[in-house]
Structure formats: structure tokens, C-alpha cells
Image (spheres, coloured by chain):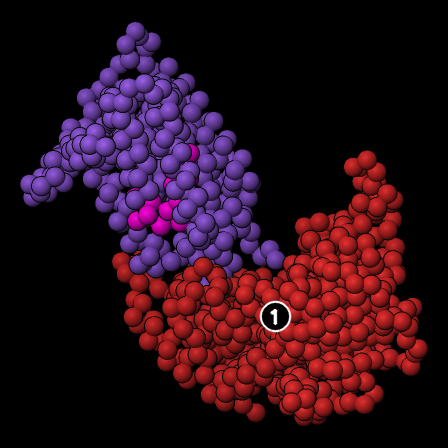
Amino acid sequence: MSIVLDIVASIGLWAAVLRIATPLIFGTLGALLCERAGVLNLGIEGIMTFGAMIGWLAVYQGADLWTGLLVAALSGAVFGLLHAALTVTLGLSQHVSGLGVTLFASSLSYYLFRLLVPLSGSPPTIEPFAPLSVPGLADLPFIGPVLSAQTPPTYLALLLALGLAYAIFRTPLGLAIRMTGENPHAAEAQGVDPMAVRYGAVIVGSALMAVGGAFLTLSAFNSFFPTMVQGRGWISIALVVFASWRPGRALFGALLFAFFDAFQLRLQTVVDGVPYQLFLMTPYILSIVALCVMARHARVPQALMQPYRRGER
Amino acid sequence: MTETVLEIDRVSKSFGGNKANDAISLTLGRGEIVALLGENGAGKTTLMSILFGHYVPDEGHIRVAGVDLPPGRPRAAIHAGIGMVHQHFSLAPNLTVLENVMTGTEKLWSWRSQTGRARAKLKALAERFGLVVDPDARLGDLSVGEQQRVEILKALYNDARILILDEPTAVLTNLEAETLFATLKEMARQGLSLIFISHKLDEVMAAADRVVVLRGGKLVAERRAGETSKAELAELMVGHRVARPVREAHERGAPVLEAAAVSVRVDGVDRLREISFRLHAGEILGIIGVSGNGQAALAGLLSGTLLRSSGDILLYGEGVGDLSVAETVASGIGRIPEDRTREGAIGEMAVWENAVLERIDEPRFSRRGLVNRSAAVAFADAIVRSFDVRGGGPLTRTRLLSGGNMQKLILGRNLAEHPRILIAAQPARGLDEGAVAAVHARILDARKAGTAVLLISEDLDEVIALADRIQAIVGGRLSPPVSADEVDARALGLMMAGAWKKEAA
Ligand SMILES: Nc1ncnc2c1ncn2[C@@H]1O[C@H](COP(=O)(O)OP(=O)(O)O)[C@@H](O)[C@H]1O
Ligand SMILES: [Mg+2]
């Protein structure tokens, strides 16, 4: 028991929680924004992979780290545009289009990577983001050292969750987005253009997903390999449901998942005689349990996955 | 003559080859209430959708206070002071009342929603017109009547001077409808102009200053409400004389369905309390009552979707315990559910699929798990023909049928095989005159052929015209039966208010 307490009380654990949570926060907020406008974006897994690759590649070719993040965001926006064109303008099935975008973006990232980076024994690396210590925050007890271990994109993710919560619940644009996800016909009758709102939400949401992916290569690690997203996109999709489509809860969900993950990693090192695969499973099992508990009362956007066509009855 | 606020000038609109509006001209004065009367498919919704900018007209102009309105732009219509209350509400159930009202009313790219100001404005409007709702309630938690109030408030919030209501009473109870019309009259008194769409003659006569009749896309007549009659309007609307069929004297047979002191409890609430009735072959037993008094539980009980908590049900003279849905179908009980689009038929399926849905297990329609499609289509085709379902054939998607024709399909599906018992819940609700007459005639035919009909309805005229005996349903209790020949509308009104309970006490 004291082992568990030691782990939970360690600064190292909580620093890892924030680091593991960051790509999930970006991914979940991105998916949440799309779904609030009524578009499920299963392109997330591929978009994160592509963002991880292109952000890394930009830096590898000599750009600075922030430019790398920006390039990743732009690439996400382009895939978002593709997904929006397929689902909003053409009204195709959002599942199929999203999975298509994932397959396309994943293969394209591997292809471009192989094309532009010579094959070598050890993967090429870049100099990733360094931890940032914010004066004032860094001096707080416990929280200070935890935060000081984080890189700038993590701070960005935390601020983004607050900003998105504010935007969705407190601004006219946020209301227009929610109305579009609930009832695009009503939105239109009130003078909001549901098509434009959906395009905007999917493009911006996809850009956030790609930034989440880029965090992996520009901060968490320093090189790219094609399987590195490892289902984080799918976890984000589940976290949106867990969060009941609320950014604040999405942040909480991402942290919770990251906590399970960081915890099992540390537990592995101190407990003997249990196959490590069991530990690897725990965050997923606990997520499923949490999802079951939370999602029963979730309020799904009513027009989620429904194509909108003008003038149709 | 008051000042003209709205002018519709020779507006036409076709869908494919179908002329939904044919050179319609209409004016609306300040403070005036105009009723737009017409059967389903007459083109009423299309005309109002053009007015509100949902559709672009093929020809013609709309002028508000003398100024041309750009076609096909809802924003411009809102800006010109036109507000629309849609037939199918255009609201978001997961958002609050205030959020529903505020959407699109502020500059999209501003830093903060002015909720405080919006709340105050909404409150002032609600008080001015007597449309009380809680601004912070989740819309989906409100009753249909309250949701409609929100729709009206939404229009008023956008400073509408001209309000259009598309079949506003179709979803309301009679009491809610009366409240609505009182509100509309108050609005007109305060200088607003209103157009409401309807196919109900009573409310048109009661609420409108002027009546405009559409038929087959054309404007066929315009009358001042004081200078016309229900009979004249009915004839104008349908194009020929319509008389609802009436019941002829007829011998009834043996009891087929009996309930003895049956109670039903749903989620801890008593929906039915010790109800008793006895339904005979070849008779129509009317269950009259304001909706929400246990009708849904009664229909659910008899179609096998609800279980009784006490009491006995006798089918063909034998106690049967609880019925299951499959048993009710197998034992010859036909059902016409109250909500035809949700329970009666599956909109996305073809007419033939809906026609055989309940019988798909029968060998003539399927064998070894494979559907015999040609037999099913032929069955559906027979229903379409003999029940005069218009607007499509067996292969049409059911959603595309109008309400009346969908109802005829459901009725046909149930009556085609001569059921011994028919449970009909609000069979004519929301239908136009022609369709009502057709549905009534079919139900009377079934009675003549020996079917026992339980007619659950809140329409006094309907029950008086069709039923042999009548029981009132109030708060989950049933009154003792009275013979239809011995009561009038007034006595029935008293029964619906629960007057029999005092006598019994
Ligand atoms: N969006 C549409 N597409 C095709 N046909 C339509 C459409 N809207 C209406 N119609 C047709 O136009 C005619 C008039 O319909 P509508 O205006 O809804 O009638 P009402 O409101 O009087 O019942 C009907 O025949 C209907 O089928
Ligand atoms: Mg209509």
C-alpha cells in the first residue's frame, strides 16, 4: 500500500501525467469541436500521425519548433477541409469518410517520411521543446516542480481547454456552433449558416488534432516513427463521450487517462511476478469503466452524424 | 382599410412537374389575423416558406411595407420583421430556452454573449404577451405547448411584426389551442399581423378575421370570417361537398374484449386505475378524454406493450393474463397508434415493407428466412388501391406520404385482414377534412363487418359521430358507459371533466 502512496505522492508521476495527457487534450478538444458542430471526425488518428510527421519534418529541415507546430496545424486544417468537403458539402457518411481520411493521412505520412528522410540504422532526431518554467508558478509547492517539467505546448493545451470552454458556452459563435450540432435547420432559420459553421469547426478541430500529434515528435520524443500515435486518436474520440461534449470535462478525462497510464508504468517497475501486459491494459479497462459510468447521462448533440441539406424536409 | 404590411404578388413555385403554388396573391393588413386554409398538399407550407426565404419562388414578389424582399434569404425576412413558427418546431432540445432564442441574434464574432440583456428582453416580451416560460429550462423538458411558446418568443425577440404560424394547433391539446388563440388575438390587438395555417374549420372560424383558401396550389377563395360558414369553407377547401359519414343502427354481437378493474402502473405512477369496459363485436366503444389522462397507457395495455398491475383482461370470453405484442397481433387485434410517424410506420422503409411488417413471419410472406417480395408488394398494392392511398405506390418511401395517406396505409394494413378487434387511438388527428371522412368511413365499414372497435379520441364530434357507446377517461379512471344516442356534446363535456365521479359518490 505504501508503494502506491509513494507513487501517487511523487512529483515524477504528476509530471508524467501532464506530459501523457497533452496530446490527448489537443485531440479530444479537436474532436469535441467537430462533434459540437455535428460532425464526427474519425480522421483523427491519421491526422495526428500526419501532424507528428510533418511537424517533425519541418523542424528536421531547419524550421524552428513553433513553425513546426504551425505547419502541423495547417496540415490538420487541410485534412479537415477534405473531411468537411466529403461530409458537409457532399453529405457522405461521416464514419466512412473519417476512416478514409485516417487511412489516407497515415499512409501519406509514412510515404513522405520515407521519401524525404533517408533510411538509416538509428532514426534521425531533432532538438525538441525544452521544459518551461514560468516565474511565479514555478515557486508553488508541489505544483511548481510538476509544471516546470512541462514544455510550452502543454501550457498551451491547458489554456486551450479553458479557452474552448469559454468560447463554446459564453460567446455567440459558440452558441451558433452548439445550435448547428443540435439542429442545423433551426440554426439556419435564425440566420446562422450551418454549412459554414461545420466547415469552420472541422477545419479548426482537425488543426488541433494535428498539433496533438506534433507534440509527440516535438516534445515527448525527438524522432518520428509511423506507429507512434498508437490509438491516441481513438482514445480522444471516447474521451469526448466521457466528457459529455464539455471541454472542462474533456481536460479532466484526458488527465484521468494519463494518470492511469503513468501510474501503471510506475507500478510495473515495483511489482514483480505480474505480466507487464496486464499493467498495460489497466488504463484502457479503467477508461471503459469510467466511460460506462459517465456516458449514461451524456447529452449527445442531436444532429451528430446527420448531413445537413438546405431546403430538405 | 388598415395599412397593408405585407403583399404577396403572383408567387409561383414548382417542385419537379408539381405546381405547389400557382400565381398566388395575398395581402395582410396591420393588426389582422388571416387564416390560410387548405388540405394537406394544397401548398400552404410552400407559400409560407417562400415568404420566409426558405424557398426561392419561380415567379412573383414579396413586398413588406412596400419594399421588395430579396428571395431565398431567411436573414432578410427576419430583418424585415417576418417571424415564422414552423409546423415541426425548429428548436434544439438540449439547449436552454434562452439559448434557443438568442442563437443568431448577436454579432457572431464578439467576445461575450450578452445574456443579461437577452434575459431581460425575453422577460419583458413574455409578460407583454402572456407567454410565460422559464428562460433557463432545458427546452426538451418543456411540454409541447411551452415549446411552441418558445418558438413564438423567438420570432418576437427578433422584433417580428408579421408572424406566420404553420399548423400551430396540430400538436396542441384543445385547452392549449384555446390559450394560443387568446395570445394571437392579443398580439393582433397590439398591432402585429398574423397568418396562421390550418385545416380545422372550427378554429379558423373562431380566430381569423379573414380566411384564404388554397386548393391544389391555387388561391380559390377569400372570405371575411363573419361572412362565411364552416360548410362553405369545407366545400371550398375540398372542391366538392364533403359530409362525414354517420353511424347507422346495427346489431352488435357478443363481447370480445373485457377489462375488469384493471390498473396499470408505470414507473411508480398509476396510469390506469381499476378501469372496466366491455367491448362487443360490431360496435364502436368511444373512450373520450383530454389527452394525457391515461389514453397512452390504455392503448399500450391493449397492444401488449404495457403490463397490468392488477385486474383481469378477458379476450373472447377467456382470461388471458397479460398480452404480448406478438399475441395481440396473432389473436386478431389491429392497432392504430396515436403517433403514426413514431409508432405506426417506419418512414425510411418502403410502403410495402410497412404493410407486411407485422405479418412477415407468415408463410405467405416469408419462407426459410427469405422474404417473398412479390407477394408482399402485391399485398401492399391491394391496400394502396382499396384504401385509396395517394401520393405513391408500394415502392415509395413511406416518409414521403402525407399524414392522411400514411394513416390510410396504417388503417389498411390493419383492416385488410378483417381483424376481430381494432384499437384506434386518435385515428383522425391532424388529418384534413377529406382524409377524416375517408378514415371514418373505413372504421364504420369495419364495424358493419363485425369488428369490435375501441376508439380512443379527444374529438367530441368524432366520438359522437362514430361511437355506439361512450366512456370518459379522466385521471386514469373510466366512467360507466353511456349510449351515444342519449348524450349531447354538453353532457360529454361534463363527463370529460369527471362529473360522473361526484354522482357515484
Ligand atoms: N421540398 C419539396 N420537394 C418536393 N416536393 C415538395 C416539397 N415541398 C412541398 N412539396 C410538394 O408541394 C405540394 C405542397 O406541399 P405543402 O406546401 O407542404 O402543402 P401543405 O402545407 O398545404 O400541406 C405537395 O404536393 C408536396 O408534396
Ligand atoms: Mg404543411
Residue at 37% in and 22% down: A277
Please state which of residues B255 and B425 is positioned toward the viewer in this rendering.
B255
Asked if residue B25 shows in the view, the reply is: no
Give the percent coordinates (x, y) of residue B379. Answer: 86, 51
Q: Which residues are magenta?
A: A233-251
Q: Does A67 appear above or below B56?
A: above
B411 displayed left or right of B100:
right
Whether B188 is among the magenta residues is no
B479 displayed left or right of A257:
right
Whether A234 is among the magenta residues is yes
Q: Is the N terminus of chain B in the top left, top right, bottom left or bottom right quadrant?
A: bottom right
Residue at 30% in and 44% down: A252
Magenta highlight: main SS: helix
Please state which of residues B363 and A308 is positioned toward the viewer in this rendering.
B363
Looking at the colours in the rendered structure, which chain would you say is drawn in red? B
B376 displayed left or right of B50:
right
Chain assignment, label 1: B
Residue at 65% in and 86% down: B501
Residue at 76% in and 62% down: B335
Q: Is the C terminus of chain B in the top left, top right, bottom left or bottom right quadrant?
A: bottom right
Give the percent coordinates (x, y) of residue B183. Answer: 51, 84
The amino acid sitting under disc 1 is: Arg
Looking at the colours in the rendered structure, which chain would you say is drawn in purple? A
Q: Which residue is mark 1?
A: B271
Is the CB of the residue bearing disc 1 within 8 angstroms of ligand 2? no
Q: Does B351 appear above or below B215?
A: above
